[in-house]
Image (cartoon, rainbow, N blue to C red):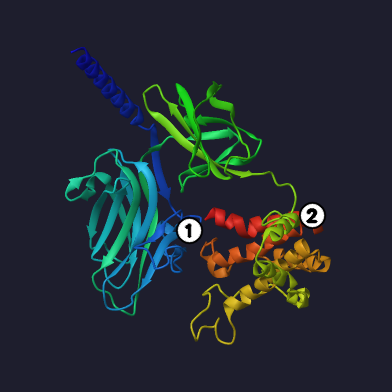
Amino acid sequence: MKNSSLVHRAAIFIFLFFIATIADAQKPLDLIPYTLMDDFETGELYGWEPYPYSQDIGFDALYFARSSPTYKNSKFALVRPVKASDATELYQGFTKRLNFYTVNDTRIKAAIYFQSDRAPANLELSLGTFSGKRYLYNMPKPTANQWVDIDVPSAEFKMNGQVRAAGEHIQVVTLKGDYPMVYYLYTYTILMDNFSINGERQRQFTASAPASVNFNMFDISILNKHYFYGDMISLVAKPEEDVPLQSVKATLTDSRGKIVKNNIAFKKKGDTWANESIYTLNPKDAPGQWQIELTGESPKGTEVKWAFKFLMPGKHVNGHPRLYFTADELQKKLNGEKSAVAKNILKKALDDTAFMKIDIDGVEEGEDKTGDNLVGGPYSKTAVGFNAYGMWITPMQTLGKVIHDGSFRYAFAKDVAAGEKAKKALLKLCSFSKWNADWMLERKFGTYYPVGYTLTPIAIGYDMLNDLLSAEERKFVREAIMDKGLKLFHRD
């Protein structure tokens, strides 16, 4: 009987502990009012993508912001033209990844324009949730060739007749027009302007020491600091709008997803929360992208939860070259390499000096005729008699090869003449007015893969030729990398 009573008490204790654990794990997030408004007035896409997805979901050449027609004479509207492939059905629209919660008065607003020879059969709007639900709203036969204002309460979105409830965690929105039949010689275009949706989103932390940057379209924040072996990780942060918190704790996770330290207590310091001795990094720690997630508890029982990502490169590298290996590190690799074939690969690469015959002075920035098309059809003005794409990119490829091959020769074969040749090519390529094609720039596409191929040898040259460059020349190359390459990617 006594044993039975002990078992009964133990069962009750385990049950209560389980309930408490569940309750603690399910504390609601602290939310703040939120309105997403995209008017495309800068000509950028603001994270919107074509929908349904094109064959190459990374790039759709016919998808961009257009200056005409626009809603109420604004600067730009988002546009998706689709060339009919046959007399068949056609679908076109837009989609964007979201992360917010609906409220009772959540509304979706937008202006839509169908440029076509007929009205589409239907305009479908949908809201998809993180739990896999998809709520739909249909507008039959929207008028073509004029702007149609949309203002729909999200409560009118339904799934199998079920009305959407407040508090749904929304992950995606789509807008899609469909035609059951189109004329096979025409192009059908959908435009969108002034999209907005309101609700609530997760309250975030912002860091001040080190400072943080929030990439809101990706739902991540980063710390503007790299930590190295031997560094003490510290952080000072505060919740948005300075809401009062009862406590703040953190979890530190390494690049492999392993929790390095948990339940890290922060102390209140004025209107911030701080911990100046979180963890000291050591050579046993995995380098890469780390994360520290803060969790604050509010007086009303909600949680302010937000993470900061940061880079931990490991060993602090002060010298050059650093992208691949130093000359000493390479020699150690070769000394430990047993394969004669493997050893010969690098030797043959370094022995190639064909780049020394290239006349750097004779390479000029190419005339860019890609504004209307990158390559053109067989009778286009930018394809007959010459290759517009080749005219634009060939000079950069030529200089890039000199930089790449000459940099390796200088760094690992001690060939000073090759280094000077590569330096001359590097400075000339960095003096070009731009590295992206007019076709992309005129359509506000900063991200185009050939720019990456141009940046690669420039980065190699900056690294391996570093001691050949003056302080002013290094600054010149750095600014070219940022202004003509990385800032365009970052903006996108």
Q: Residues within 10 Å of mark 2 (few under 14, many from 20)?
A: few
Q: Give the residue at mark 2.
A: 472
Marks 2, 1: nearer the viewer: 2
Residue type, numbered disc 1: Lys
Residue at the image point whose x is 23% and y is 65% from the top? 121
Number of labels in the image equals: 2
The one nearer the camera, 468 or 45, is 468
The quadrant where residue 235 appears: top right
Label whose residue precedes the other's in the sequence (2 or 1): 1
Q: Secondary structure at mark 1?
A: loop
Residue at the image point whose x is 54% and y is 61% from the top? 447
Does residue 306 show up?
Answer: yes
Q: Which quadrant is the N terminus positioned in?
A: top left
Residue at the image point whose x is 70% and y is 53% from the top? 322
Residue type, numbered disc 2: Glu
Q: Secondary structure at mark 2?
A: helix
Q: Is residue 470 left or right of residue 317?
A: right
Which percent across, then down, holds residue 164? 23, 44
The one nearer the camera, 339 or 365, is 339
Q: Give the residue at mark 1.
A: 75
The quadrant where residue 482 appears: bottom right
Which percent across, then down, holds residue 194? 40, 53
